[in-house]
């Protein structure tokens, strides 16, 4: 993709004989929310660190915001790592202004924007408070303000939802959506599929440093098998006797059945009614979770 | 690896402001004068806290103890009268407030003579009067009525330290029992005829660590016995004094211009001053680089490093840290020097009270202060580079301390050689160590009293600067990778790989 905001081509990174990222290629379309999905240790953070210019790839090419050297466009990029903190003794406004100035904003601008953004994030009363006095949610907001203060063209968030309560998950999601509304590109990594499903326009699934699949959410779903979701009462073990089923994800009174290509849903329903009390029967596209588990489950370490 | 000075300056400014606002910073600043005051007043305080040494005398000669006692009384009275003369009437004991000015040396000598004679008589219960009228009588009676008071008023007198315990008629076994009970520190045995010589004099004690009383009493006995011998040989006192007069060697200092001058204590102190500065330099460099180490490890553990590195290059971050803490360190050191100079110049009495030391000798040598600042900066930068690299590898302070070990061992060397180099500032040891960059700042400071040639200064400084540049480069490479590392610090071999690998990278 020529106009991609981020383009990786055959990028590889090795640490002390462990291949963290293996010939990874991907393209992030501008103005979208792009997800990097994968289980823990899949190489998400290493990929992200390379494209924000903290690590350099061993081989392959990498273009970020029309530059071959990410370290030169740090000022146009906002990065919030998974592990994040604040200078506890610093005042909130000083802290966000400091990060703005590190990104090249003049002092006065940094303070003006910092004030405005903090107000926007309902932290107006906390300008002069020390960071150590903030609650976790407020700290999270301050970190996001510090990431956005210089109005970056590309925003990179590593596991932005991990460790957050539902209120803060929604808060972060709204911020991400608001950034897309302003036509900025957001790249985020996560291992929580439901969240990716809700907000990502496109995504890549990686495991053991390698790409398993990528594309828009619709593309990925089209390529996936049909599924049937049921709510039932009875002995779930009977589900395993059904023919034409690829995989069963059984939660006891709720199950997701992945069908083989030629299987007829009506046959399945008929067979189920014979054996179990069916309260709900739903045919639909596979959930991202199901797609992910299938993709990762079929992928074994090299 | 190109340095972005404005980014580094931003980091440095933040670092400096944060440090200066901490309580630890102000504690460090105020610690120095506090320690200085403590060091200069402790000996005085200790003197008061020391318990008196109680001793007894088993006098077989029948006269030596009395003669010595008279001498002790005379010495003590001399100290007492001198103290009285120094104090205003209000500061004197109530009974002796109106004794007069005691300005004239003759008056004082007469007062000492008379008071001593009276006290000796009191001691031997030979005094026939009861009402005190003359000044000498009033002092003697005051002393008799409150035997503890004189030593309290004039703590410099010998009886404040050494307390004679009368043990009439007691023999050795009894005295030994007293020693065992700790009622005595020790006792002296004076032989039948000490004048004839031939030994037999003993000092019996259980505590050999405290020999002060033995030395003091032995000198007095020697004096008394020597006087008796002189009298028995019919030698005129003037002749005796002449025979015993020691030969005094005056210390004469040849200065740089070739002129001779009589050397006082302050000259000796001036030549030892560099050693004091080496010590101060060592403490400054050690504590401030330690601060940098802690700070680097903190930065790793507070998880800000990654965000910072997405904004600025590692080398900027490291340079900013080193500079910010350097500024903090220089602030502390300059504050110390200012306080020190201020204390010495404004309150000479405070510091010289300890032992008549004229510390202004330290202050009146601007070259010392100047080289101190220069070598502080050089030494700091060198060790800061090492510690920043090390700090970036450790994920907590404990790991950092382990990694620090080799550098701590390195830093012990200047302390060990401090005094030997002070004695022989241009010896082989000093010359060799001057050229080893880890030691250059300390050793060159150490040699400041007898500075080597300009060539040595220029050469060692250049070598130092090259080493600093090299150390900073290496540290930046380690820092770049280390600062993102989590878990165990790498083995030495991995570290080497890391340095080599990095050096191939071109940015």
Image (cartoon, grey):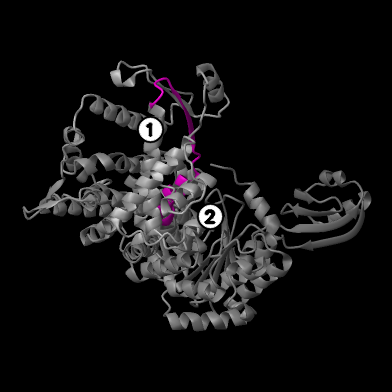
> For this rendering, which residue is in front, B304 or B95?
B95
Residue shown at the point (58%, 71%) measured from the top left: A130
Density class for disc 1 (Cα within 10 Å; few <14, some 14-19, many ≥20) is many
Magenta stretch encompasses residue B47: yes
Residue carrying label 2: B301
Quarter-wise, where is residue B420 in the image? top left
Query: In the rendered view of the protein, which quadrant contains the C terminus of chain B?
Result: bottom left
Residue located farthest toward the front when viewing the structure as drawn: B128
Please state if A276 lies on the left or on the right of A200 as rendered: right
User: Dot 2 falls on which chain?
Assistant: B
Q: Is residue B211 left or right of residue B360?
A: right
Label 1: which secondary element: helix
Q: Nearer the viewer, residue B388 or B41?
A: B41
Residue B279, placed above or below residue B200 = below
Q: Position of residue A73 (x, y in %)?
A: 40, 70
Give, as a single range, the part of the protein colored magenta. B36-63
The residue at which mark 1 appears reads as B68
Q: What residue do we see at 30% from left, 15% from top?
A: B198
Quarter in which the N terminus of chain B is drawn? bottom left
The total number of labels drawn is: 2
Q: Position of residue A208 (x, y in %)?
A: 55, 48
> Where is residue B248 shown, x and y percent of the image?
17, 40
Query: Whole-percent x and y of residue B358?
Result: 28, 56
């Amino acid at each position: 993709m020529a106009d991609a905001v981020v383009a990786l081509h055959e990028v590889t990174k090795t640490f002390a004989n462990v291949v963290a990222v293996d010939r990874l290629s991907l393209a992030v379309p501008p103005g979208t929310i792009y997800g990097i999905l994968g289980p823990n240790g899949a190489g998400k953070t290493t990929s992200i660190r390379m494209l924000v210019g903290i690590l350099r790839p061993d081989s392959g090419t990498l273009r970020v915001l029309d530059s071959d050297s990410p370290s030169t466009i740090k000022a146009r990029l906002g990065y919030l790592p998974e592990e994040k903190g604040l200078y506890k003794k610093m005042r909130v406004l000083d802290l966000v202004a400091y990060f703005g100035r590190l990104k090249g904003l003049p002092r006065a601008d940094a303070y003006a924007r910092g004030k405005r953004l903090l107000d926007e994030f309902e932290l107006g009363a906390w300008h002069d408070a020390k960071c150590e006095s903030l609650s976790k949610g407020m700290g999270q907001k301050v970190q996001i303000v510090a990431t956005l203060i210089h109005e970056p063209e590309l925003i990179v968030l590593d596991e932005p939802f991990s460790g957050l309560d539902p209120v803060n998950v929604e808060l972060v999601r709204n911020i991400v959506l608001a950034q897309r509304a302003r036509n900025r590109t957001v790249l985020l990594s996560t291992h929580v599929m439901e969240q990716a499903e809700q907000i990502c326009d496109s995504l890549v699934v990686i495991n053991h440093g390698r790409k398993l699949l990528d594309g828009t959410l619709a593309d990925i779903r089209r390529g996936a098998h049909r599924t049937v979701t049921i709510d039932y009462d009875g002995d779930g073990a009977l589900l395993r006797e059904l023919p034409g089923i690829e995989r069963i994800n059984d939660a006891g009174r709720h199950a997701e059945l992945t069908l083989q290509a030629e299987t007829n849903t009506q046959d399945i329903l008929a067979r189920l009614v014979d054996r179990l009390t069916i309260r709900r029967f739903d045919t639909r596209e596979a959930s991202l979770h199901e797609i992910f588990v299938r993709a990762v489950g079929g992928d074994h370490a090299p | 690896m190109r340095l972005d000075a404005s980014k580094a300056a931003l980091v440095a400014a933040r670092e400096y402001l944060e440090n200066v606002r901490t309580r630890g910073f102000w504690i460090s600043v105020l610690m120095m004068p506090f320690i200085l005051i403590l060091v200069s007043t402790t000996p005085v305080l200790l003197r008061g806290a020391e318990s008196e040494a109680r001793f007894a005398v088993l006098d077989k000669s029948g006269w030596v103890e009395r003669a010595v006692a008279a001498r002790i009384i005379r010495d003590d009275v001399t100290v007492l009268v001198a103290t009285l003369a120094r104090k205003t009437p209000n500061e004197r004991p109530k009974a002796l407030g109106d004794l007069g000015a005691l300005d004239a040396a003759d008056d004082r000598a007469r007062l000492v003579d008379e008071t001593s004679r009276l006290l000796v008589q009191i001691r031997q219960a030979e005094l026939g009067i009861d009402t005190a009228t003359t000044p000498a009588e009033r002092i003697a009676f005051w002393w008799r009525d409150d035997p503890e008071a004189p030593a309290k008023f004039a703590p410099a007198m010998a009886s404040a330290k050494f307390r004679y315990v009368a043990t009439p008629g007691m023999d050795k076994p009894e005295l030994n029992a007293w020693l065992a009970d700790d009622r005595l520190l020790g006792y002296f045995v004076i032989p039948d005829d000490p004048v004839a010589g031939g030994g037999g004099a003993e000092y019996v004690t259980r505590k050999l660590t405290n020999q002060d009383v033995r030395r003091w009493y032995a000198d007095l006995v020697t004096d008394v016995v020597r006087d008796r011998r002189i009298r028995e040989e019919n030698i005129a006192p003037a002749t005796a004094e002449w025979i015993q007069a020691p030969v005094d060697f005056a210390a004469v200092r040849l200065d740089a211009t070739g002129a001779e001058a009589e050397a006082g204590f302050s000259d000796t102190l001036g030549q030892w001053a560099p050693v004091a500065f080496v010590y101060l330099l060592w403490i400054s460099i050690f504590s401030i680089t330690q601060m940098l180490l802690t700070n680097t490890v903190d930065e790793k553990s507070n998880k800000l490093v990654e965000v910072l590195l997405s904004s600025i290059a590692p080398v900027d971050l490291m340079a900013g840290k080193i500079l910010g803490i350097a500024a903090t360190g220089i602030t502390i050191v300059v504050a110390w020097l200012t306080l020190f100079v201020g204390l010495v110049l404004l309150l000479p009495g405070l510091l010289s009270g300890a032992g008549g030391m004229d510390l202004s000798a330290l202050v009146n040598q601007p070259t010392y202060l100047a080289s101190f600042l220069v070598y502080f900066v050089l030494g700091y930068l060198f060790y800061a580079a090492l510690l920043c690299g090390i700090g970036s590898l450790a994920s907590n302070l404990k790991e950092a301390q382990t990694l620090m070990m080799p550098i701590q061992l390195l830093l012990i060397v200047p302390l060990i050689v401090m005094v030997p180099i002070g004695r022989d500032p241009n010896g082989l040891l000093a010359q060799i160590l001057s050229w080893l960059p880890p030691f250059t700042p300390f050793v060159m400071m150490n040699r400041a009293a007898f500075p080597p040639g300009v060539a040595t200064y220029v050469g060692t400084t250049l070598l130092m600067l090259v080493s600093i540049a090299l150390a900073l480069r290496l540290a930046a490479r380690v820092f770049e990778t280390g600062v993102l590392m989590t878990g165990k610090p790498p083995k030495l071999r991995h570290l080497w790989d890391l340095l080599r690998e990095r050096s191939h990278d071109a940015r």
